[in-house]
């Protein structure tokens, strides 16, 4: 039986309903019986998936799209103050609710696992959602990516566990009060909202302070995550479980054995060893799986059963997702946009590629991130045999004078990389065709619309 729908969420209107976070909340509410509506800038497969659930989706933003009887208007931090639907809500006196508050209300009364960290949130949340579903526990989940296809980023389940990706970018994860929280890593990112590591730590400490009394914090082996664990170690009523390859880890990773695009992982937890397959390559994904194992055990799931169920995870959209093969060239899609993520995915693909060449089409994401981390992005691209670098994808940001993808190109060349700047995205398929040969791997990389290039590259190679 579905939990009761909060009054404010009975007839919600979502501005930007096609976004990964927003669409997930809308989908769960629709599945629970709410009358959901919303608007988005353009048509998409996600909009169609929402309509299939009975959601009214308008294309474009206009005051008339907001129904007079809407119970609330749901927004994300990306919605600008001059949005016409937001202005109409003010005229009508309709309350405005941030998406994090809406998601927090969906977790009420359930055993919530919130997955946080600068990197790896989507994958780890997905691993838990798939494994719990495989065990017949019917979890609810809200994820920042699609498990198998458009519209599969969220689901209402009848089980008692709710697994949610907890986004630190705008501090919204501080709204959640999970029974178990995972913090995979802590690094400086989202430079428009955080000025220093001190601010980042303060934000993560506020997040962990909301863990329910008697709950658990699972932390990864990353230095920032361990520093967070040190800062909260004396908090009364909080269990801290460390995950990693070091001997002092509570959930200790004993072995990671690469096998092409998979890894065999062995984890020692609570006095027993558990071996399972992770169906994506790379050490960082093995660490994500170990964190999922530790978190699931803390909500009462048998670790041996959960380890076997984790093998059912076969990947999530844009996380080293194979898009296809043409003329012996495999095209793989990566969401990596921070230098740490880029390095991890490139090292994983380098390990999986063997003697094959690794070619990258990289699209920087956000002017502020490029300004702060452009040099490190360029250095990461030196791990590829050759790279194409596109213009910066602005997302929610306005341009910053002097900040262009040329910062990355220069840094990459200084690091010895073979890199080509391309300002016309439409020219990329032909350029890649001239670079790639049978056996090569092409990686489209970035958090923007570079993902659209994968199918176009495959089409071009097939001709």
Image: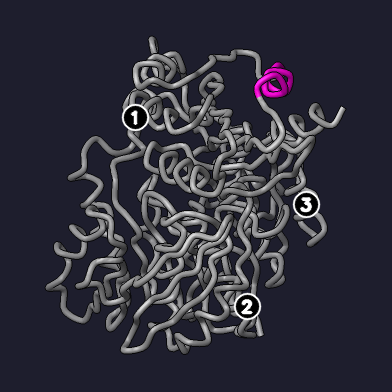
CB atoms of marks 3 and 2 within 8 Å: no
Please state if 325 lies on the left or on the right of 340 as rendered.
right
Q: Secondary structure at mark 3?
A: strand
Mark sitting earlier along the chain (3/2): 3
Badge 3: residue crowd in 10 Å (few <14, some 14–19, many ≥20)? some
Image quarter (top left, top right, bottom left or bottom right) of the N terminus: bottom right
Please state if 154 lies on the left or on the right of 228 as rendered.
right
Q: How is the image coloured?
A: one colour
Q: Nearer the viewer, residue 248 or 209?
A: 248
Mark sitting earlier along the chain (1/3): 3
Q: Position of residue 417 (x, y in %)?
A: 43, 22
Residue 432 included in the magenta stretch of the image:
yes
Question: Can residue 59 be seen in this snapshot?
Answer: yes
CB atoms of marks 2 and 1 within 8 Å: no
Residue at mark 1:
376
Main SS category, magenta section: helix
Residue 422, image quadrant: top right
From this view, report whether residue 8 is shown above or below residue 299: above
Label number found at residue 276: none
From this view, report whether residue 149 is shown above or below residue 411: below
Residue 68 included in the magenta stretch of the image:
no
Residue 391, image quadrant: top right
Image quarter (top left, top right, bottom left or bottom right) of the C terminus: top right
Residue at mark 3:
56
Q: Nearer the viewer, mark 3 or mark 2?
A: 2
Residue at mark 2:
133
| Residue visible at 53% across and 52% down in the picture | 95
Question: Magenta span covers which residues?
Answer: 427-435
| Residue visible at 39% across and 59% down in the picture | 116
């Amino acid at each position: 039986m579905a939990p009761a729908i909060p009054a404010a969420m009975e007839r919600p209107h979502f501005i930007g309903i096609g976004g990964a976070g927003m669409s997930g909340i809308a989908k769960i509410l629709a599945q629970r019986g709410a009358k959901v509506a919303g608007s988005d800038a353009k048509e998409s497969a996600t909009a169609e998936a929402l309509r299939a659930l009975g959601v009214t989706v308008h294309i474009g933003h206009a005051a008339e799209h907001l129904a007079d009887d809407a119970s609330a208007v749901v927004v994300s931090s990306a919605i600008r103050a001059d949005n016409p639907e937001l202005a109409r809500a003010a005229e009508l006196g309709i309350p405005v609710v941030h998406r994090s508050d809406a998601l927090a209300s969906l977790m009420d009364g359930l055993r919530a696992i919130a997955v946080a960290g600068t990197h790896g949130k989507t994958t780890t949340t997905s691993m838990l959602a798939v494994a719990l579903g495989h065990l017949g526990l019917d979890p609810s989940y809200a994820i920042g990516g699609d498990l198998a296809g458009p519209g599969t980023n969220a689901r209402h389940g009848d089980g008692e566990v709710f697994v949610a990706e907890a986004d630190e970018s705008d501090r919204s994860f501080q709204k959640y009060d999970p029974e178990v929280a995972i913090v995979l890593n802590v690094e400086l990112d989202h430079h428009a909202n955080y000025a220093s590591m001190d601010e980042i730590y303060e934000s993560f400490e506020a997040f962990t302070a909301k863990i329910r009394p008697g709950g658990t914090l699972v932390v990864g082996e990353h230095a920032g995550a361990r520093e967070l664990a040190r800062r909260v170690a004396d908090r009364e009523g909080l269990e801290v479980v460390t995950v990693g390859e070091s001997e002092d880890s509570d959930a200790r990773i004993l072995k990671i054995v690469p096998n092409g695009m998979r890894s065999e992982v062995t984890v020692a937890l609570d006095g027993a060893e558990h071996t399972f397959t992770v169906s994506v390559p790379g050490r960082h994904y093995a660490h994500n799986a170990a964190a999922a194992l530790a978190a699931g055990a803390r909500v009462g799931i048998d670790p041996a059963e959960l380890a076997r169920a984790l093998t059912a995870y076969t990947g999530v959209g844009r996380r080293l997702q194979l898009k296809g093969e043409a003329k012996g060239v495999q095209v793989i899609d990566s969401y990596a946009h921070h230098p740490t993520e880029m390095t991890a995915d490139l090292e994983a693909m380098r390990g999986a590629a063997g003697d094959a060449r690794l070619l990258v089409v990289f699209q920087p994401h956000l002017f502020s991130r490029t300004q702060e981390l452009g040099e490190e992005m360029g250095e990461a691209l030196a791990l590829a045999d050759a790279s194409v670098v596109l213009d910066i994808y602005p997302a929610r940001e306005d341009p910053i004078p002097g900040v262009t993808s040329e910062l990355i190109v220069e840094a990459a060349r200084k690091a010895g990389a073979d890199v080509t700047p391309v300002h016309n995205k439409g020219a990329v398929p032909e350029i890649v065709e001239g670079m790639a040969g049978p056996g090569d791997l092409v990686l489209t990389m970035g958090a923007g619309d570079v993902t659209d290039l994968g199918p176009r590259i495959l089409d071009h190679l097939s001709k």
